[in-house]
Image (cartoon, grey):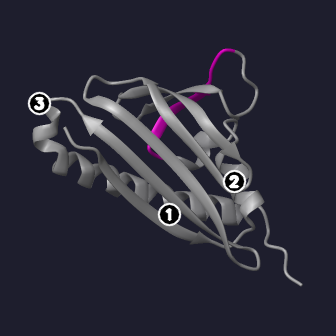
Amino acid sequence: MKTTKFTESIIIDRKPEVVFDFTQDYNIRLTWDTFLRKADLLYGAKEAGAGVKTLCVAKNGIGMVTEYVSFNRPKVTAIKMIDGPYMFKSFLGSWTFKETGEHQTEVIFLYAYEFRFPFSLISTVIKIKLQKEVKKRLVDLKANVEKSEPAITL
């Protein structure tokens, strides 16, 4: 089976620290992440960080337990699937936060995954759906983070 990868990005008019912290705050995650209906830190964790496990359930009911394998504020965070739907043989995701100007951040989502048979037969259809959802999440993230905290202008 082959690994499928894709990236999507958006420019947000806030500093990387602000955007990073906003995305990794599970107390507010469901206010902007319209793909999810549940997002919980597991095993008593109070905040996201390397080694922390999470449970995220999409609005379609498909859930996944992940573990943070990287957490480098405010530059990058990455997760890998620990337990998830049978359709995925593996799943990795990363969010990169690049300062592109004063008080401006490019947020890049990268997903890499491998399907089990027979889901591999419809991998193109699933990829198109996932990319559409990621684009929507980024638009929703931008709208919410930009309205939540004013930009600092000098």
121 versus 151 height, above or below: above
Point 78% across, 62% down: residue: 149
Mostly what secondary structure, the magenta segment? strand
| Residue bounds of the magenta highlight | 34-43
- Gap in angstroms between the C-alphas marked 1 and 2: 15 Å
* Amino acid type indicated by mark 3: Pro
Front in this rendered view, residue 17 or 82: 82
Residue 4 is situated, as x and y percent measured from the top left of the image, at 28, 48
- Name the outermost residue toward the top: 43
In terms of sequence position, does the residue under pointer 2 or pointer 3 come before the other? Answer: 2
Give residue 139's mark.
1
Relative placement, left or right, of 37 versus 86 is right
Q: Nearer the viewer, mark 1 or mark 2?
A: 2
Give residue 20's mark.
2
Residue 116 is situated, as x and y percent measured from the top left of the image, at 20, 29
Dot 2, crowdedness within 10 Å: few (<14), some or many (≥20)? many
Point 57% across, 63% down: residue: 107
- Gap in angstroms between the C-alphas marked 2 and 3: 37 Å
For the residues labelled 1 and 3, say whether their Cβ atoms are less than 8 Å apart.
Answer: no
Does residue 104 show up magenta in the picture?
no
- Gap in angstroms between the C-alphas marked 1 and 3: 32 Å
* Amino acid type indicated by mark 1: Val
Quadrant location of the C terminus in the rendered image: bottom right
Dot 2 falls on a residue whose secondary structure is helix
Point 63% across, 59% down: residue: 144
Quadrant location of the N terminus in the rendered image: top left
39 versus 86 height, above or below: below
